[in-house]
Image: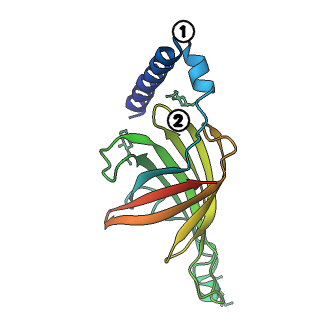
Amino acid sequence: MEKLLSLKRINQVAMAVFVAAVLSGLSTNVVTAESNPPPFKESHLEYYAQLDVRLPGISTAFLPPINTTLSANFGAGTLFASNITEGVAATSKLLGSVRGYTVETSYLGSPDSWLLEVAFVEYDDGYYNGTLQLQGLVQQSLTELAITGGSGSFRGAKGYLVVTLVVDSLPTRTFRHDLTFL
Ligand SMILES: *[C@@H]1O[C@H](CO)[C@@H](O)[C@H](O)[C@H]1NC(C)=O
Ligand SMILES: *[C@@H]1O[C@H](CO)[C@@H](O)[C@H](O)[C@H]1NC(C)=O
Ligand SMILES: *[C@@H]1O[C@H](CO)[C@@H](O)[C@H](O)[C@H]1NC(C)=O
């Protein structure tokens, strides 16, 4: 799997270099293309994440609740990792991954069900390439995370991301991430 992924990336690098060379009419090299991906200048981006709840970490708490009698699920943590794709189908173009964790911040005195989520996205569509750092509250009604920064094409990124559950078909839950850059 790792091999397939890196072969795909290598093809994407080759394509990016080829396109850059054609556009500029100059020769260039892979090192330049990798270390200086084009800055992301658009205001929106979206992708899909398919979470298979059977995978390790996603459904199992990697941190147990502190004390369910005294504090409900306060402190319980879930670790997740998923591919991200261009379309809703897991077989659509692979763009990278989203990985992170949520921690329950609600105890018996807080009747909401807010979770703190911290995650990062690795994104590579063959043109834009980099990481995004995400942080915010997961709520049943609306999950909006802050985009707090990034690397590569997303250096200095600022904005927000809305998470929508688009397919709830266990064992897979598919989420759409709508990103707005400010
Ligand atoms: C992620 O994508 C890779 C490459 O397409 C694939 O081999 C792997 O099975 C995917 N992982 C999941 C959890 O779908
Ligand atoms: C994207 O960046 C990663 C990490 O620097 C690199 O391995 C990959 O080849 C890059 N992809 C493209 C298309 O340049
Ligand atoms: C949880 O808190 C309750 C109330 O203080 C206490 O009686 C119980 O022993 C605690 N349970 C654990 C596993 O610490």
Q: How many marks?
A: 2
The yes-or-no answer for disc 1 within 8 Å of ligand 2 is no
Report which quarter residue 62 is drawn in: bottom right
* Residue extending furthest toward the right: 156
Query: Residue at (66%, 52%) from the top-left corner?
Result: 158
List the residue tagged with mark 1: 27
Query: Residue at (50%, 14%) from the top-left corner?
Result: 21
Look at the picture and state if 10 lies above or below 169: above
Query: Residue at (54%, 42%) from the top-left corner?
Result: 122
Quarter of the figure with the C terminus = bottom right
Q: Nearer the viewer, residue 123 or 114?
A: 123
Q: Which mark is residue 128?
A: 2
- Give the secondary structure at mark 1: loop
Quarter of the figure with the N terminus = top left
Q: Nearer the viewer, residue 84 or 41?
A: 41
Residue 106's x, y, as percent?
Answer: 62, 80
> How far apart are labels 1 and 2 at the CA level?
20 Å
Query: Residue at (63%, 25%) from the top-left corner?
Result: 35
The kind of residue tagged 2 is: Tyr
Earlier in the chain: of badge 1 and badge 2, it is: 1
Q: Nearer the viewer, residue 111 or 39?
A: 39
Residue 64's x, y, as percent?
Answer: 58, 70
* 57 sits to left or right of 35: left
Q: Which mark is residue 65?
A: none
Residue 178's x, y, as percent?
Answer: 49, 57
Residue 140's x, y, as percent?
Answer: 49, 77
The kind of residue tagged 1 is: Ser
- Give the secondary structure at mark 2: loop
* 159 sits to left or right of 93: right
Q: Residues within 10 Å of mark 2 (few under 14, many from 20)?
A: some
* Callouts 1 and 2 close, C-beta under 8 Å: no
* 177 sits to left or right of 169: right
